[in-house]
Amino acid sequence: MGTAPPPPHLAVALDGAGWHPAAWRWPDARPRELLRPGYWIDLIRRAEDGGLDYVTIEDSLGLQTSRYDGPDGRVDQVRGRLDAVQVAALAAPATSRIGLVPTATVTHTRPQDTARAVATLDRLSDGRAGWRPQASNRADEAGHFGRRTLPRFDLADIDRPEIAPVFAALFDEAGDHVEAVRRRWSAAPPPQGHPPVMVLAHATVPYRLAARAADVVWITAFDAARVRAIVAEVRAAQRAAGRAGETLHIFGDLVVFLDAGTGAAKARKDRLDELAGEVFHTDTLVFAGSPAELADLLAEWQEAGVTGFRLRPGALPHDLDAIAGLLPAELARRGALRPPGGGTLRSRLGLGAAR
């Protein structure tokens, strides 16, 4: 018999009223509070009370959109966000254990500005900061700055001969940005030295960015077979980048609708689909079920090679509360719950000294 893997790390991804586009219409949603700091502090405290390792906060330089390449003009979905780094900074003194990981778009910003913002967050939180460098291919975001133009393209276009070099260059720039940020931390380092870098990756080019520059990569997939293939590709890229001896966590990234009853979550998701006027699907698996069913799925993906999970609540605060309450109870029953952590985010993730 093989040795059981260690309990997985758990994180939660916060955005708006939840990841379902109609989540703002659910009875316990708080759409009037989405641009108020207290809403975010409350959500992050709920995640901390559940013992989660960290929360991530979404951001971009343009409005949310259902398109890959620019605004969609819709007024029936949540549009507009607070600055993610500032939200995390506001939450830092209101929390004590949970990691805080904002998104920072790096395509049009200066490394020195990123370095100062994340270092400040790390000091405010006593070493609980991480950050997600995000490359932007959106032509509308480039237009805000006027320094460059980008062609409009969709994810399905990234292998086209005229698009592939542009797509690869954006992620090469992101890797250079990360390295430049780390160099700026060598003079007056923040508490962690280098707060952990986390990358969302859907394809080979961002897998290579993660292998080169990240401490954690979030991968998207629809079944365990695809998870296994992605893990193999990321590990191969990690070896090619000369980092075979370093810790690079691979987290499964999925949307979660969670209720105690087996059918309750599916019924709730179906009702949200009705409110939206279409079936919700996204870049990864959308789970709807009970804590036992979710724990089974997580175990299956962990056997395929992931070391943790970033769970995106379908609706807030409902699914966040279930992830922070019902899921840990089920994992504890199975002996698969990681004990509550403390200290820095690097130490909580077992990353060791900053490189």
Image (cartoon, rainbow, N blue to C red):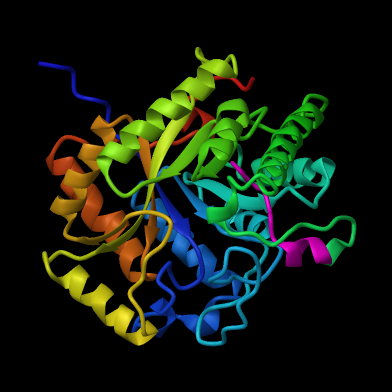
Could you tell me which quadrant the C terminus lies in?
Answer: top right
Q: Indicate the position of residue 9 as horizontal and vertical percent values.
A: 36, 37
Residue drawn at x 27%, y 73% is: 269
Residue 142 belongs to the span the image colors magenta: yes
Could you tell me which quadrant the N terminus lies in?
Answer: top left
Q: Indicate the position of residue 261 as horizontal and vertical percent values.
A: 11, 66
Residue drawn at x 38%, y 54% is: 284
* Residue 196 seen in render: no
- Furthest-front residue in this view: 161
Foreground residue among 318 and 262: 262
In which quarter of the view is residue 138 placed? bottom right
- Furthest-right residue in this view: 147
Range of magenta residues: 130-143
Q: Residue 84, relative to residue 175: is it above or below? A: below
Residue drawn at x 15%, y 52% is: 293
Left or right position of 122 against 26: right
Left or right position of 232 against 199: left
